[in-house]
Amino acid sequence: MFERTFIAGWADMDFNSHMRNTAFLDRCSDIRMMYFTEYGFPVEEFARRSMGPVVMTDDVRYHREVHLLQEFRVTLAAAGFAEDGSRFLLRDEIWRSDGKLAASITSAGGWLDLGTRKLVAPPADLLAAINELQKTDDFEVLPSSIR
């Protein structure tokens, strides 16, 4: 399982003194880019290829609060892929240091060609990197986004 540990900072807090909803989404974006970087696709490589990931929906389920300066870890797994890799469902889970699940986020997206502004299938080396992700128990095969 790909995971990273973070600390909830001042800028992550909301009026109720717990981690704000968009901070959860920010950490999900961070860990995805950390994953892609580790597998040979840093931001510069996406820019060179004139493509990048695009998220179309986020389904966020909150379970427990995360408080200021609390350590938490974020996991990343595949909840679904199209066979050609053109669509994906990525699942992030936010775990508090006490082992309790704080949130589960499932994001649906695809790969955007930055020139044509259309969804495309990823190149073979990116598809191979994506396929290295651990799959969730409810993993599903998605239809292709290429028409």
Image (spheres, rainbow, N blue to C red):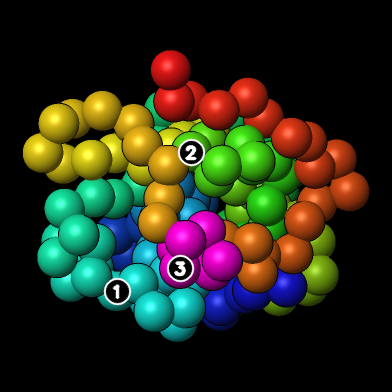
At label 2, counting other C-alpha atoms closer than 10 Å, the crowd grade (few under 14, some 14-19, many 20 or more) is many
Most common SS among magenta residues: helix
Left or right, 110 with respect to 107, comes to: left
Residue 126 among magenta residues: yes
**Up/down of 34 relative to 51, above or below:** below
Dot 2: element: loop
Q: Residue at x 54, y 45 (%)?
A: 85
| Chain part drawn in magenta | 124-129
Sequence-wise, the earlier of marks 2 and 3 is 2
Q: Is residue 45 visible?
A: yes
Image mark for residue 42 = 1
Q: Identify the residue under disc 2.
A: 86
- Work out how far the residue at label 2 is from the one at label 3, CA to CA, in angstroms: 13 Å
Q: Could you say where residue 3 lies in the image, as x and y percent from the top left?
A: 62, 74
Give amino acid for label 3. Answer: Asp
Give amino acid for label 2. Answer: Ser
Dot 1: element: loop
Depth check: give the residue in front, 56 or 60.
56
Q: Residue furthest left?
A: 115
Q: Residue at x 52, y 36 (%)?
A: 87
Q: Identify the residue under disc 3.
A: 125
Q: Could you say where residue 74 lies in the image, as x and y percent from the top left?
A: 60, 66
